[in-house]
Image (cartoon, rainbow, N blue to C red):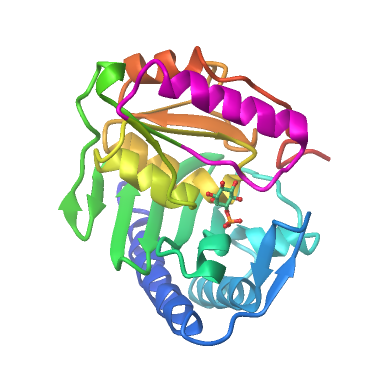
Amino acid sequence: MADQWQEAYDFAVQVARAAGAVIRKAGECEIKVQTKSCTVDLVTQTDERVEKIIIGSLKEQFGEGTHCFIGEESVAKGEPCILTDKPTWIIDPVDGTTNFVHGFPFVAVSIAFAVNKELEFGVIYSCLEDKMYKARKGRGAFCDDEPIQVSDVKDIHKSIIISEHGTDRDKQKVKKIFSTMQKILCIPVHGLRGSGTAATNMCLVASGATEAFFEIGIHCWDIAAGAVIVKEAGGVLLDVDGGPFDLMSRRMISANNMVIAERIIKEIEIFDSVRDDAP
Ligand code: IPD
């Protein structure tokens, strides 16, 4: 069935836009902040509210029971984070919660859809910029309905690379993150960046503004939609050790091409993180 998931794709775009409007409005009021795994892992009522709105709308549209859901805030509350063959929505209601709390202007709604463990489409609404990124397997990637393409830079010396620090403040891990960044900066590359949202970072790779984004410690909901968008824009996704991309592994590099990806991988100091689907 060629167009089996078109309705779901179109609906995801609508839902992401509506969720973004809720986030924008919430950002105008006082934001009550709580913490999750540690003091810098922030969550707000908006994260929880927006996830409920998204999952509620999807259940209403597609029926409870037939589709599964992996949502950042539901998992934080103890829901399982297991990808099965069933149609599954993978949701980050507010990617860039720290940005949202501080008014740093990059916050995204990220919605992906997988069937038989394969990502079918991804939608990322960068709601403060009002930019809608989307991609469906085999059909190209778009920003506000205009096709997007990764950059054609192959010379690492002419690249901009994105990475993030995440929320783990374990000294050894932080040391490895900064050591990796130092080595990459001194290759040298044109610059290092980070928007504070993995989803937006992947859209920046997909639209050619930057050559690569990598991170260890991210979760499947941060990167699932971005993975489809980067791939459909002509980019590549790999594990940070050069192996195949694994959505549940908590680590990945997305890049405009293999030349850039493999050059960056040489510099990455890998550290352990527990898989999203660990028992
Ligand atoms: C975070 C952002 C950030 C990344 C963290 C993520 P959240 O997601 O994507 O860029 O560095 O690893 O956890 O918590 O704001 O949804």
**Residue 121 visible to the viewer:** no
Compared to 247, does 255 lie above or below? above
User: Which residue is at a point 65% across and 65% down the rendered structure image?
Assistant: 65
Residue plotted at (30% across, 47% down): 2
Q: Answer left or right for 78 relative to 204.
A: right
Measured from the top left, where is residue 159 in percent x and y? 29, 26
Please tell me whether residue 170 belongs to the stretch shown in magenta: yes
Q: Where residue 110 sits: x, y (%)? A: 47, 58
Question: Which region of the structure is painted magenta?
Answer: 163-190
Residue at 58% from the left image edge and 30% from the top image edge: 246
* Residue at point 64%, 59% (across, down): 72
Q: Position of residue 237 (x, y in %)?
A: 44, 28
Residue lying farthest to the left in this orientation: 146
Image position, residue 81 (x, y; %): 71, 49
Q: Does the segment drawn in magenta span residue 165?
A: yes
Q: Is residue 242 above or below residue 26?
A: above
